[in-house]
Image: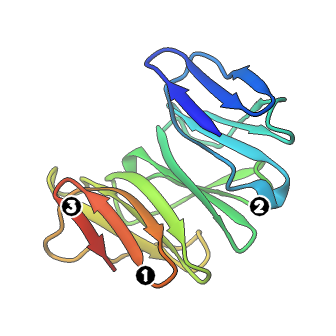
Amino acid sequence: HTIVSGILLMVCLVWRGIVRLGRVSWRDLGWPAEKLGRSLGLGLVGTVLVARDGTGWEQVDVGTTADLLGVTAGDGRLVAVGAGGTVVTSDDGVDWIVRPTPTTGRLTGVAWDGSRFVAVGAGGGALFQGVILSSADGATWIDRTPERVSPLLGVTWDGQRFVAVGWVGALAM
């Protein structure tokens, strides 16, 4: 799958052809929900689109207008993160719950390692401070930010550890 994004228009190129998804600046478009039989797209102002076959996209209400910037799936649950410390979860990609977090920072990425979620980002108390949160279930989040970490832009699980990338390189956790 190839993604081409712009400021006003996002076009998703899929093997079946071109699908126009509307006039939203898209942040993450992926298939983390494929185990649930759905594709998922995230955008600004709380926009989430879901599709069963990758072509019939429908917008769903996630209960927030915060920009959503990252999404992952784990243990049968979708977790999306975004601005203002926003975390929303769904077990089906359609019905979403806004979850409280211990940060007001901008969460930019989230990953699953088989037993816990880790979300990363920037801000909160200080503009140039990174943010690291963890959760066993996607619902209850704990702040794991070390004393000094620069803003983080994304995170992944490499099979042995979480690896986050940020303003000044990478951080293995």
Crowding at dot 1, Cα within 10 Å, few <14 / some 14-19 / many 20+, comes out as: few
Residue displayed at 64% across by 18% down: 22
| Badge number at residue 161 | 1
Residue annotated with mark 2:
91
- Is residue 2 or residue 134 the one in the foreground? 2
Query: In the rendered structure, which disc, 3 or 1, sits on the residue that comes first in sequence?
Result: 1
Residue displayed at 54% across by 16% down: 9
The secondary structure type at the circle numbered 1 is: loop
Is 93 situated left or right of 114 in this image? right
Q: Which is closer to the viewer, label 3 or label 2?
A: 3
Coordinates of residue 45 in the picture (x, y in percent)? 51, 31
Q: Residue furthest front?
A: 15
Crowding at dot 3, Cα within 10 Å, few <14 / some 14-19 / many 20+, comes out as: few
The secondary structure type at the circle numbered 2 is: loop
Can you tell which quarter of the image residue 14 is in?
top right
The secondary structure type at the circle numbered 3 is: strand
Query: In the rendered structure, which disc, 3 or 2, sits on the residue that comes first in sequence?
Result: 2
| Badge number at residue 169 | 3
